[in-house]
Amino acid sequence: MLRTVLLGPPGAGKGTQAVRIVEKYNVPHISTGDIFRENIKNGTELGKKAQEYMNKGELVPDDLVIEIATTRLLADDCKNGFLLDGFPRTVYQAEKLDAFLEEHGMKLDKVIDIEVEKEELITRLTGRRVCKACGASFHVVNIPPKTEGICDNCGGELFQRADDTVETVENRIAVYIEQTMPLVDYYKNAGNIVEIDGALPLDTVFGQIVEAIGE
Ligand code: AP5
Ligand code: MG
């Protein structure tokens, strides 16, 4: 049983570590960003609404995100825990999540805060390439795929996210500092946050996370 949240700026490595965490602890990976991108790909109403904000690097309005996340948390596969990636992202979302969990007799075990400094975030995001088929993340310099443009895991085609341009990345980081960083104090008050140095190599970061969560 593990109910946890991955917090951290854009490019900190939330998605990358999430793949490993869900494999080890056998819980579903719930990324609100992935849910929106899937809706954009499928041309749904939700996707159209979310896209307006995402392309500018702004946050999608709270009520829309809360509805999506809490509906997802009611699915059967979340009965034995979950890993939230990129939700909550405002104090209001965190309060609503707490209220929802309490209403259903649950609480968060841990909040994992992965921190990386700004210059490194920009380098990581502008060099990121993502697999169209399985969603795995690579980096043109840091984590290059064996064959350029092709996913190591599934052979799918790699692409660059629409919000990974320098300009949008800068805005996403500014939005993070202004609207999401206050969550660090929110969870410090709750006493369940652990800070992880996300600038270290992938395996070291994962090791710190496992240490924080426990085997
Ligand atoms: P979302 O999809 O959540 O994006 P994000 O938070 O901006 O974070 P990223 O996915 O860009 O970064 P990551 O931390 O997952 O890094 P990754 O592992 O890929 O959200 C997108 C948008 O959706 C938001 O802007 C907003 O509009 C909307 N949205 C989503 N949730 C919302 C919410 N709750 N409320 C409102 N709006 C919401 O790694 C990045 C790169 O670095 C990769 O290339 C990777 O290979 C590399 N890398 C990773 N770890 C390391 C390492 N240790 N060393 C070297 N390189 C590394
Ligand atoms: Mg991500």
Image (cartoon, rainbow, N blue to C red):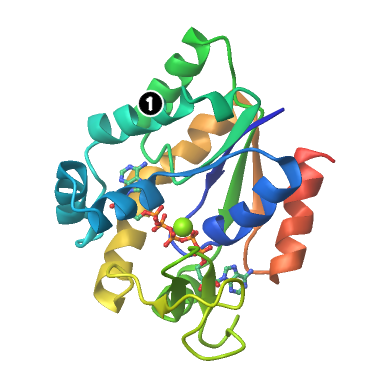
Which of the two residues, 86 or 117, is positioned nearer the viewer here? Answer: 86
Q: On the image, which quarter does residue 63 sit in?
A: top left
Q: Position of residue 20 (x, y in %)?
A: 68, 55
Q: Is residue 141 above or below residue 165?
A: below
Which of the two residues, 100 or 43, is positioned nearer the viewer here? Answer: 43
Q: Position of residue 136 (x, y in %)?
A: 53, 66
Q: Residue at x 50, y 83 (%)?
A: 150
Q: Residue furthest bottom?
A: 148
Image quadrant where one finds the C terminus: top right
Q: Which residue is under mark 1?
A: 71
Q: Residue furthest right?
A: 215
Judged from the image, the secondary structure of the residue bearing numbered disc 1 is helix
Q: Position of residue 159 (x, y in %)?
A: 38, 77
Q: Position of residue 110 (x, y in %)?
A: 65, 33
Badge 1 density bin: few <14, some 14–19, many ≥20, Cα 10 Å: few
Side of 129 relative to 202 (left or right): left
- The amino acid beneath tag 1 is Thr
Q: Residue at x 20, y 42 (%)?
A: 46
Q: Is residue 195 above or below residue 165?
A: above
